Image (spheres, rainbow, N blue to C red):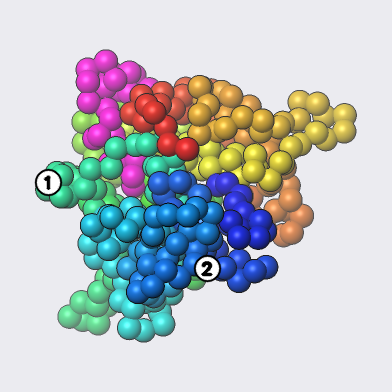
Amino acid sequence: MRLYECGNCGTPVHFDNRVCINCGSRLGFLPEAMAMQAVMPAGDDLWRVSSRQEGDVRFCANAAHDICNWLISVNDEHTYCQACRYNRMVPVTDNPEGLARWQKIGQAQRHLFYSLLRWNLPRPGRDVDPQGGLVFDFLADEVDSYGNLVPAMTGHEDGLISLRAAEADDATRESVRVSMNEPYRTLIGHFRHEIGHFYWGQLVRDDQTLNEARSLFGDERADYAEALRRNYEQGPPADWQTRFISTYASTHPAEDFAECWAHFFHIVDALETAHSFGLSTEPRRHEGMAAEVDFDPYRATDAQTLVDAWIPLSVALNSIQRSMGQPDSYPFVLSPPVVQKLDFINRLIRRAGAGYSQ
């Protein structure tokens, strides 16, 4: 994620900021410029970007509940921004719990869409493809007739990405992570994983691409229920860490692809953040751990370039976390087979997003 600056006073501002802490200017993210903008009131519900003389904008309709800070061009027919317009079912906003969940979910979703826009990936919605277009449901848990809690399910099916809204609560999400013995579980991780399933259907279509994908990840036509049953009864393969990014990736080829897709997003976005802050590593007498992100990770020509920069930085981040008594930020190993899978995804994205955004 890039580091931005206030268009009014030049103070550094971040992707999720609403107001400049120095000059008090209202801030919003304008997707067409891929930048945070300082805006001034222009009458009614319109705003004017302070750095340009023409072109009014307005805030996404979800800004009314402090859920979204994205801007929409005045000539756009949508009332919701380029991220929020894909949502179908959202948490309620008439109570503090629902509103807090919606705010956290919206934040993670905008981080997802930032990457989709940077890569200029196709995003057909249900208005274009009623049967398989992209759409999001953020689902509340239910209570059955016996008074038992029935958790909503997170998953993907034919373009529909469902997310259990309760996972926006730290205690709920952490309890699930611990019960499932997972090293990592976040809202943005859910979004990046589930969108991977969507893009398999969008991008892995022609025979050549499909054959290469199957040679790396396996045959996605393998019985999914049987794969989950086998994993539940037998656990992951003993050598899973030499071939997969996570134990969940080892359950089925479709999950392997989605997990690698999510990690590709993690790595690229984190490297862009490091690049924006000028971070580098050069530990004394450990030249092999030196790294500097002196390139745009979103435009990397191969995954190995990303991995070569990421491994030293992630080791440093993990060490800092341990110094604070916190778990590792990135508790994963990038084996050579995983790097091959990441490279396939990089090439897939580059082809699909030819003519990248800014």
Q: Is residue 212 magenta?
A: yes
User: Is 170 placed above or below 216 here?
Assistant: below
Q: In terms of secondary structure, where does tag 2 sit?
A: strand
Q: Is residue 290 left or right of residue 189?
A: right
Residue 218: horizontal and vertical position, in percent? 32, 26
Q: Is residue 235 left or right of residue 178?
A: left
The circle on residue 131 is 1
User: Is 222 placed above or below 89 here?
Assistant: above
The range drawn in magenta is 194-217
Residue 63: horizontal and vertical position, in percent? 39, 70
The residue lying at 67 percent from left, 68 percent from top is 22
Kind of residue at disc 2: Arg
- Comparing 141 with 187, the one in front is 187
Kind of residue at disc 1: Gln
Distance between the alpha carbons at the discs numbered 2 and 1: 39 Å
- Visible residue check, residue 307: no
Residue 114: horizontal and vertical position, in percent? 44, 47
Q: Main secondary structure of the magenta part?
A: helix
- Comparing 186 with 75, the one in front is 75
Q: Earlier in the sequence, mark 2 or mark 1?
A: 2
Q: Is residue 341 magenta?
A: no
- The residue to which callout 2 is attached is 26
- Comparing 61 with 206, the one in front is 61
Dividing the picture into quarters, in which one does residue 308 lie? Answer: top right
The residue lying at 71 percent from left, 41 percent from top is 278
> Crowding near pointer 2: few (<14 within 10 Å), some, many (20+)?
many
